[in-house]
Image (spheres, helix red, strand yellow):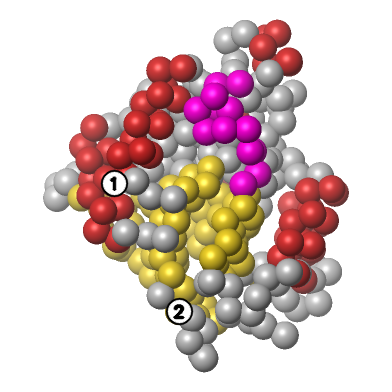
Amino acid sequence: MTTLLHISDTHFGTEQPPVVEALAALASELAPELLVISGDITQRARAAQFAAARRFIDRLALPFVSIPGNHDLTVVNPLLRLLAPYSGYRATFGDELEPVHESAGLLVQCVKTTRWWRHIEGEVNTEQVQRVAARLRQARPEQLRVVVVHQPVHVEGDAEARHLLRGRDAALSAWAEAGADVVLGGHIHLPYVAELTPPGASGARIVVAQAGTALSSRVRRQAPNSVNVIRHETTSAARFSIERWDFSGERGEFQRVDTRSFELRRH
């Protein structure tokens, strides 16, 4: 069994200490193979916020991959945003903005969807789409194939449509055809799971899993702080599941509130 813990939109600078402690306890209990952080790690890309985020991640003592969200680009210095928009992120997490994790049962490909010239919206370009698809085609049949973005590739309801990732249709079609199983995202602070058949993907299906804000007080639409747990069974009848875990203020812990199961589709 391979376990992946997906968190997003921690927004350090607005984190809530009881939720921080509860997430640390959950991570210790689950002991996942990998922690995935899908952007907006800080609130204002300040050095102190990056430092707090790094202390928390180091405290978890887990292998991790991360990507920057739009909040992780410098905003207070226009010249720095132009010349070195990811300087704070790079100083904290290293120069790799699209890391890859590979193990016996898992392939995780991160995609940088932020752009320095966009304040909120994100995009994925043709080169990224093709490069990710090529990497997915190299995966072994037993590997769960995961793509990580920040802005959502799918939303539920028209109210969030303005946040949709630009280039998403071409990306979903190419990645589904190349064998991607799951696309993980954040940005809108609303958790949900959906199974899609992208147009032009010849019937190939792909699962989209959005995480809410893991730690921040900036919850939306009364959706609580939440994270996703993905479990992959490497058996002859290979399956994977996505669990939603919500923070309960009454109990002071994250609790599993939903589980969706899917079959791995291999040609």
Q: Give left or right: position of 152 versus 178.
A: left
Secondary structure beneath label 1: helix
Label 1 – label 2 distance at C-alpha: 24 Å
**Pointer 2 residue:** 233
Secondary structure beneath label 2: strand
**Pointer 1 residue:** 23
Percent x, y of residue 109: 63, 55
Q: Is residue 9 above or below residue 78?
A: below
Report the front residue among 97 and 266.
Answer: 97
Q: Is residue 13 above or below residue 202?
A: above
Kindly identify the amino acid type of the residue bearing the numbered disc 2: Glu
The range drawn in magenta is 87-99
What residue is drawn where x is 45% and y is 79%? 233
What residue is drawn where x is 68% and y is 70%? 139
Q: Hey, which quadrant is residue 102 in on the image? A: bottom right
Report the front residue among 103 and 97.
Answer: 103
Q: Give left or right: position of 219 versus 176.
A: left
Percent x, y of residue 178: 75, 69
Q: Hey, which quadrant is residue 89 in on the image? A: top right
Categorize mark 1 by other alpha carbons within 10 Å: few (<14), some (14-19), many (20+). Answer: many
- Say if mark 1 contacts mark 2, CB within 8 Å: no
Kindly identify the amino acid type of the residue bearing the numbered disc 1: Leu
Which label lies toward us, 1 or 2?
Answer: 2
Number of numbered labels in the structure image: 2
Where the N terminus falls, by quadrant?
bottom left
